[in-house]
Image (cartoon, rainbow, N blue to C red):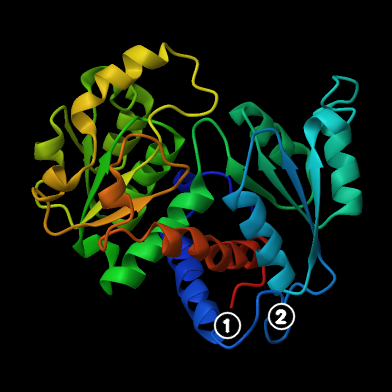
Amino acid sequence: MKHFINLKNIPAKDLRKIIIDAKKRKNLRKKLSTLEVDKGAPLKGKLLIQMFEKSSLRTRLSFYLAIKQLGGGTLTLRSNELHLGQGGESIADTAKILSTYGDGFMLRTDSDKKVENFAKYLSIPVINGLSPSSHPTQVLSDVFTVEEITKKPISKLNICWIGDSNNVLDSLIAASVKFSFKLSIGCPKKFEPGKEVRAWVKKNNKKIYIYNDAKKAVSGADVIFSDKVISLNDKVNKTKKIQAFKNFKINKELMKFSNSAIFLHCLPRGDEVSEDVFLGKKSHVWQQALNRVHVQKSILLYCFGKLR
């Protein structure tokens, strides 16, 4: 049994195994319809319990399809429908019940501590579907997508992030260390990655490159990532934040400074990217979203100890 909580804590060789398995599984599904089960039904009889404390579209759908295509089933819970959500039952007791009824637990939450506590008390694997400091399933799938499109190992590419320092970027930074790729970050100085993240990179003898100029950040980039500048639960002065990012909008003019880069966005989108870039030939956002299913299947197999 293995948890999948933060890319920082997962060996690079295991992350690579997941990507290799996902590639094989995607190729084998070319002639199968959406709900047809993979050959061998490797997770037949297994139940994945999902709990969402935050809104979700892609994570919810992709995990539903992932476990179904592996031959298992899923049950989705909302914390405000449980005794846990009303403060009437401890995480320890809730974890005991989850471990009794289910075989795996996927949590999307607004608390890193809650993920850690569930991992402490669960006797089944826990997968982090998003927390304030990490979005590991998204970013591992993004690595898969980059290599699929470019047909190159990501270690040979220059990756750029334009946008806020959020949980997706934290996981992308972790991925840059695990997969040894150059990562350039473009954002206003006030929104640079935190000291803890930078210290972890330094501790691992790696380096990230931070620019307060979008043109410098994208210079020579093969891939440009972004995310919504104003997230759903962003507790800031939204007008001021949008103003701070006015020179970091990803448009055709900015893309010209890159190495004919492809564009990826974890969605949902906002005003941080122009329509012509988002829907342009260099954008692969829909392929990126669909790949979540394939990679999450291999993550599930990894957690269940059934990765080929």
For residue 231, the mark is none
SS at mark 1 in the image: loop
* Image quarter (top left, top right, bottom left or bottom right) of the C terminus: bottom right
Q: Where is residue 19 drawn, in percent x and y?
A: 46, 68
Looking at the image, is mark 1 or mark 2 earlier in the sequence?
Answer: 1
Q: In this view, does 167 lie to the left or right of 263?
A: right
Q: Is residue 139 visible?
A: yes
- Residue at image position (37%, 26%) is 196
Q: Which of 163 and 87 is in front in this view?
A: 163
In the rendered image, the vertical position of residue 30 relative to residue 242, given as above or below: below
In the rendered image, the vertical position of residue 300 relative to residue 208, given as above or below: below
* Image quarter (top left, top right, bottom left or bottom right) of the N terminus: bottom right
- Residue at image position (53%, 52%) is 137
Residue type, mark 2 in image: Glu
Q: Where is residue 3 drawn, in percent x and y?
A: 63, 51
Q: Quadrant of residue 72?
A: bottom right
For residue 29, the mark is 1
SS at mark 2 in the image: loop
Q: Quadrant of residue 109?
A: top right
Q: Where is residue 70 drawn, in percent x and y?
A: 70, 73
For residue 36, the mark is 2
In the rendered image, the vertical position of residue 197 relative to residue 255, given as above or below: above
Q: In which quarter of the image is residue 169?
A: top left
Q: How far apart are marks 1 and 2 (CA)?
A: 9 Å
Residue type, mark 1 in image: Arg
- Residue at image position (60%, 72%) is 307
Q: Which of 91 and 138 is in front in this view?
A: 138
Q: Nearer the viewer, residue 175 or 190?
A: 190
Label 1 close to label 2 by CB (< 8 Å) = yes
Q: Can residue 304 be seen in this view?
A: no
Q: In this view, does 16 lie to the left or right of 162?
A: right
